[in-house]
Amino acid sequence: MKRLLLDYSTLWRNPTWNTGIERVARRLGEELISITTTASNKKYEIIPVALDDDGIFVTLDHIPKINDIEMSNVVEELLILPEDIYFVLDANWDRRVLYKLYPPWSAGLTVGVMQYDLIPLRIPWTCVSYMRQAFSDWLRECSEFVDFYSCISGSTEKFLLEEIQKRHPWRTSQESLST
């Protein structure tokens, strides 16, 4: 059975965060788990995961909840397989998760990212400088390694495609984006 690995590295460290991104990330994961749990022809195993401070991927026994203790609920170290799908649902700008995924990605792992917005690039004066830099670095990382995106809106998709094509013009829209 294929595995869909849902990255919650940021929420795992900051479970009390509850802005729009965190609420959507939690809800999407809960729905995916619910759908696969009740499906009669289950095709995917859904596993919440995180990257720990030592650069090791771990499985979590549940999606981080708002009342969890930081970095709790680890089950075991995660062995990522080439046939897995790794999906970053969380705003994970500073963890360098994708670079850590390079070895399994080069062996066949499929990597996806949920893109909520591009505010640090599109409206930079609304963000502090370190956030703009972290987001820019994250987007560079994404444009190098991500196989698919899921965007929260059509305008986010449009702006993301423009950014990817600026950074890596050889990637076509079919290779870069999936909503």
Image (cartoon, helix red, strand yellow):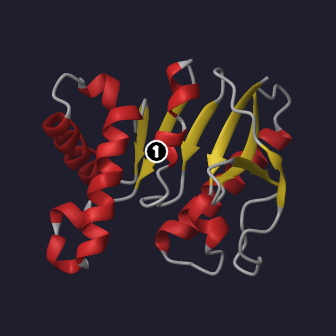
Q: Is residue 67 above or below residue 34?
A: below
Q: Amino acid at mark 1?
A: Val
Looking at the image, residue 21 sits to the left or right of residue 50; the answer is: left
Residue extending farthest to the front is: 54
Question: Do we see residue 177 in this rendering?
Answer: no
Return the residue nearer the eye: 48 or 42: 48
Residue at (64% x, 81% y) in the render: 16
Identify the image quadrant of the C terminus.
top left
Looking at the image, residue 145 sits to the left or right of residue 171; the answer is: right
From the top left corner, tell me how far across and down residue 98 is, in percent.
48, 42
Residue at (74% x, 41% y) in the render: 46
Residue 18 image-quadrant placement: bottom right
From the top left corner, tell me how far across and down residue 164 is, in percent.
23, 38
Looking at the image, residue 36 sits to the left or right of residue 97; the answer is: right
Return the residue nearer the eye: 141 or 19: 141
Q: Which residue is mark 1?
A: 113
Residue 81 image-quadrant placement: top right
Q: Is residue 155 above or below residue 46?
A: below
Question: Do we see residue 129 in this rendering?
Answer: yes
Residue extending farthest to the top is: 107
Q: Is residue 47 above or below residue 79?
A: below
Identify the image quadrant of the N terminus.
top right
From the top left corner, tell me how far across and down residue 154 is, in percent.
28, 48
Residue at (48% x, 72% y) in the render: 20
Looking at the image, residue 144 sits to the left or right of residue 64; the answer is: left
